Image (cartoon, helix red, strand yellow):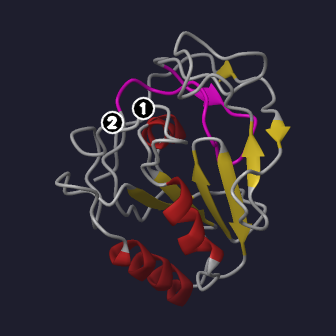
Amino acid sequence: MLPPPVAAGSADVQSAALAVANPSGIPGVVAYDTTGWPAGRHNGPIDRALPHVHVPGPVAYSVTPPVGGDHNATWLDCGVYDRPVPPERAVHDLEHGAVWITYRPSLPARQVAELRAFEARQSFVGSTGSRYVDLSPFPGLSSPIVISSWGFQLRVTSPGDPRLQRFVDAFRVSPTYSPEYGGECNGGVGTPIAA
């Protein structure tokens, strides 16, 4: 079951995200300014860092798919969805340390199955019962597959690209990169077809 959409209303327009040097060592990763998050202070972004304020309505993100920013107060239950999910809920998952794998709705079924198998191979995090991975189609992508975490993104053309696993290993539930390290990935809204 898909999560409910966020409240209607005027979109909260996110300022252009500021790209910065990629500290991960993973070729092709684009990094965005998260200065002040998660370490240091939690009272707001510094300069053009990605904000993370709870907003009730839609958000017009400057990066597609989003890599952070203001988001809905209720997160998405992590897992596999076969239709697009509200980005404002998925971004809350990123804040908690999830990675979000998105793909073009036109991606061949065989490749979607490979992405689902990739998600299923990821270990559960602690005793949470969650892999802290979201997988969903996302219309309008410039690349067939895009994997995102809070402040980082990688575009690939194949589900067999080894950088996908490197990305998960580097950014999923990371005390270094997750603004709300230890936040829940269950108990939100939506019922994934696989969790």
Above or below 119: residue 96: above
Q: Measured from the top left, where is residue 97 in percent x and y?
A: 44, 45
Q: Is residue 13 left or right of residue 5?
A: right
Q: Is residue 173 left or right of residue 15?
A: left
At horizontal 37% and vertical 55% (from top left) the residue drawn is 132
Q: Measured from the top left, where is residue 101 in percent x and y?
A: 54, 62
Is residue 77 on the magenta stretch?
no
Q: Measured from the top left, where is residue 102 in percent x and y?
A: 57, 61
Residue at label 1? 180
Secondary structure state at the residue bearing disc 2: loop
Specify start and end residues of the magenta stretch as a single range. Answer: 57-74
Disc 2 to disc 1, C-alpha distance: 6 Å
Tell me the crowding category of disc 1: few under 14, some 14 to 19, or many 20 or more residues within 10 angstroms, Cα based.
Answer: many
**Quarter occupied by residue 67:** top right
Is residue 71 on the magenta stretch?
yes
Residue at label 2? 183
At horizontal 58% and vertical 27% (from top left) the residue drawn is 37
Q: Amino acid at mark 1?
A: Glu
Q: Amino acid at mark 2?
A: Gly
At horizontal 51% and vertical 21% (from top left) the residue drawn is 57
**Quarter occupied by residue 6:** top left
* Circles 2 and 1 in contact, beta carbons < 8 Å: yes
Q: Is residue 119 left or right of residue 32?
A: left
Task: Residue at the far top: name it.
Answer: 43
Residue 106 visible in this rendered orientation of the protein: no
